[in-house]
Amino acid sequence: MATAGGGSVADPGSRSLLRLLSFCALLAGLCEGNSVERKIYIPLNKTAPCVRLLNATHQIGCQSSISGDTGVIHVVEKKEDLQWVLTDGPNPPYVVLLEGTLFTRDVMEKLKGRSGRIAGLAVSLAKPSPASGFSPSVQCPNDGFGIYSDSYGSQFAHCKAFQWNKVGDGLAYEDFSFPIFLLEDENETNVIKQLDSRSFFWNVAPGAESAVASFITQLAAAEALQKAPDVATLPRNVMFVFFQGETFDYIGSSRMVYDMEKGSFPVQLENIDSFVELGQVALRNSLELWMHTDPMSQKNETVLNQVEALLSTLEQSSAAVPTVVLRRLNQSQPLPPSSLQRFLRARNVSGVVLADHSDSFHNLYYQSIYDTAKSINVTYPAGQSPEEDLNFVTDTAKALAGVATVLARTLYQLAGGASFRDTIQADPHTVTRLLYGFLVRANNSWFQSILRPDLRSYLGDGPLQHYIAVSSPTNATYVVQYALANLTGKVLDLTREQCQNPSQVPTENKDLYEYTWVQGPLNANETDRLPRCVRSTARLARALSPAFELEQWGSTEYSTWTESRWKDIRARIFLIASKELEFITLIVGFGILVFSLIVTYCINAKADVLFITPREPGSVSY
Amino acid sequence: MTLCAVKSQLASGETARPGQAFFWLVSLLFSSLIWFTTATLIGNKDEPREKYLLIFGVLISVLIQEMFRFAYYKLLKKASEGLKIINPYEKAPSMRLLAYVSGLGFGIMSGVFSFVNTLSDSLGPGTVGIHGDPPQFFLNSAFMTLVITLLHVFWGIVFFDGCEKKKWYTLLVVLLSHLLVSALTLISPHYGLNLVLAYVIMVLMGVWAFFVSGGSCRSLKLCLLCQDKDFLLFNQRAR
């Protein structure tokens, strides 16, 4: 930004001075903390963008122009308002501010069709959540990457029998050429589903019903099983696995199966006796929990018998749990989208998926921004402090604890135990604390006590997000790992140095166990923490799709999902000057320039006349 | 001959301009140092304190600018006396011309600094107004910059003349009017009032500077009525 800093460049001294001046002027222009900028722009802070995701065959999501998009804001509160944006408005392009209830497929199709007139879209969160449901996911999730294909179980492939996600409109898998933002008025985001979920918007993935409730139940079951007295001596091992990335064509489970086939996982496929998976379990109708099995693998007699044994074990375990009623399904129904499908692709294991739905999902907000604590009835009475909320046992927590009890007892029996089965009980307090931490407020005393000191900042004041993201592990992964370690591990009496170097201690084995130095609970005065060493067998394994390791970029066998790169994604609002004002400013400036040139020339020409210098006496010649 | 003399005066005057501009920069540096140390000494950041700090900063800045103007005058005086000793036959640059260019240097630098920030923001897609400020913000800023630049020119002329003729009240008037114009900018919402008052002061200063530089009502009338040719005959310059 060059400005005039002095007239002539008669000599080098003034030239360098001029350079200095111009440089200072530039610096002044680049000063931050600019109050003029604050007068012009209002930055939108609480926004979540929709980003570009790509896989082997498609690109989905949204994209802006390289230097951003600008448009006139137009609020669309009802369908009729769209006409202005699409055809009538005289000043395209427009940035549409869309009411959350109008964020549906047909509106988006219309906007997509006229994308020349649309510079961008901002969606406001609908409060309350749309009653009829909202799911931008497809109706048949993870189709093509499960067991059913045109060559195997074709009558079940592509959800021919019925659609699992009836409410799904597939918006999240569409390709938009303009940027879309979510305006979050309040910090309500829920993310859940297996470990991970997604929504239309980047890093907003609540997934309460889709994933969180399920893995919390599994954590509670792990804790309950751990407490059984003879658990260490059971003939078979129980391995609890939490898969990440299942939303994106089963990244986690496909990787584990691949590792098992290659032999780089400690357990081989043939060593899997049975597989019990928790699907969506928080929205049970009248206590019913459905047991889904795969009809195709049960065509084999052996597998059929194994599955039958598995189902009857489950039924026996639930007999003494009044809050859970297990139900079987008939053989003509396929498995819902689940990690078990990837294992069945590789080998006919006997497996069952427990879910709250018999056919289509009960979840009306599958993989959407509305799948929050409220959608699974996790609500707290008003006027309580966060600590009181943390320890308040909701009905949902009790229900999930019942499911966890059934699961734990089943696993105990499948592992070969018998004597203590009916004493195994999942703790509703654990479940409610996990629900609070994952769905309402991650920064609470319990979560803080189970994490390492350097991970303290991972806990925010809102719920955790469960979008898998490219950088790993995510915050949620760490929290689940440490929760599992805390619930199933043992507190040891080691110092910090010993905990970080357990090979120095003769009784400890670094290869068998994982040793972590965690923050621990607050002391009595609530000023400091009492850190301790926790020994557990909870480990992380990288969930990177085998397609990338094998460099099969066009693979249809493994997930090939990637994120596009971006720098800064932000939005701001401002006014633009009217054309009249701009014209006036230009004319005035130009006029003053011309006027000043004329005046200067005239004064300069007549300087002798105008300015009489004082003369020495005697020189007057009049 | 006359033309050559004017040309040499212009050449030396134009080196004076960046020099004075540099002096203005240094004065700004000093005043901002003082403001910064005061700000850190005071410490906390509550609203009225910030405002008083700003007012204090502006006052100090005006004082230091005028001090530097005086310092520059002294420097130029010493330089021209030195030149006279070295080369007594060369016509020394007229102090009036030096006053004009030094005022112009001061004014340009001050204008640039106050306006370039606003100018760079005006290049963006948005304009002022979303928080309720008047949309003519950029026009107002431009006019304010213009009036400040012109005022600095006139102040320079008047100031140097006052120093030459030892009329110290002149310096006081310059200082006070500078303070007044700066104080006006602090009551920012009323742009119209600011601008009108500043322009009034500028016109007054301009008239004073005109008379100080040797102009008179008569010469102005003659100039405007294009009777200057006759006038020149009456006012032959001594060789």
Image (spheres, rainbow, N blue to C red):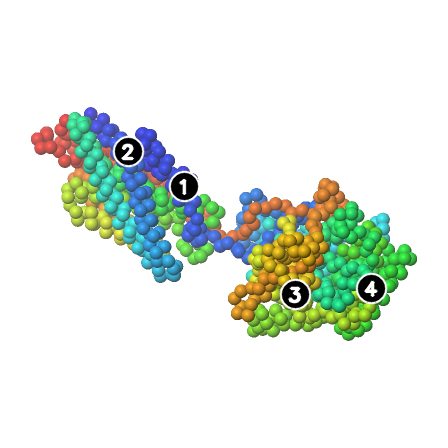
Q: Chain of mark 4?
A: A
Instruction: Work out whether residue A319 or residue B150 is closer to the camera in this orientation and state it.
Output: A319
Query: Which tag, 1 or 3, sits closer to the chain's start?
Result: 1
What number is the disc on residue A434? 3
Identify the residue at image location x=30%, y=55%. Answer: B56
Of all residues shown, which one is farthest toward the left?
A618
Q: Are marks 4 and 1 on the same chain?
A: yes
Where's residue A341, x and y in %? 79, 54
Where's residue A491, x and y in %? 65, 63
Q: What is the C-alpha distance between the residues marked 3 and 4?
A: 29 Å
What number is the disc on residue B15? 2
Of all residues shown, which one is farthest toward the top?
B1
Instruction: Work out whether residue A452 or residue A168 is closer to the camera in this orientation and state it.
Output: A452
Q: Amino acid at mark 1?
A: Leu
Where's residue A140, x and y in %? 76, 55
Q: Amino acid at mark 3?
A: Leu
Instruction: Work out whether residue A93 or residue B93 is closer to the camera in this orientation and state it.
Output: B93
Of all residues shown, which one is farthest toward the right?
A301
Tell me the quadrant of the picture where the N terminus of chain A can be found.
top left
Q: Are marks 1 and 3 on the same chain?
A: yes
Instruction: Work out whether residue B116 or residue A514 is closer to the camera in this orientation and state it.
Output: A514
Q: Are marks 2 and 1 on the same chain?
A: no
Q: Residues within 10 Å of mark 3 (few under 14, many from 20)?
A: many
What number is the disc on residue A416? 4
Relative to A505, is A546 on the left or the right?
right
At numbered mark 4, what does the secondary structure look like: helix, strand or loop? Answer: loop
Residue depth check, mark 2 versus mark 4: number of the one nearer the observer = 4
Q: Residues within 10 Å of mark 2 (few under 14, many from 20)?
A: many
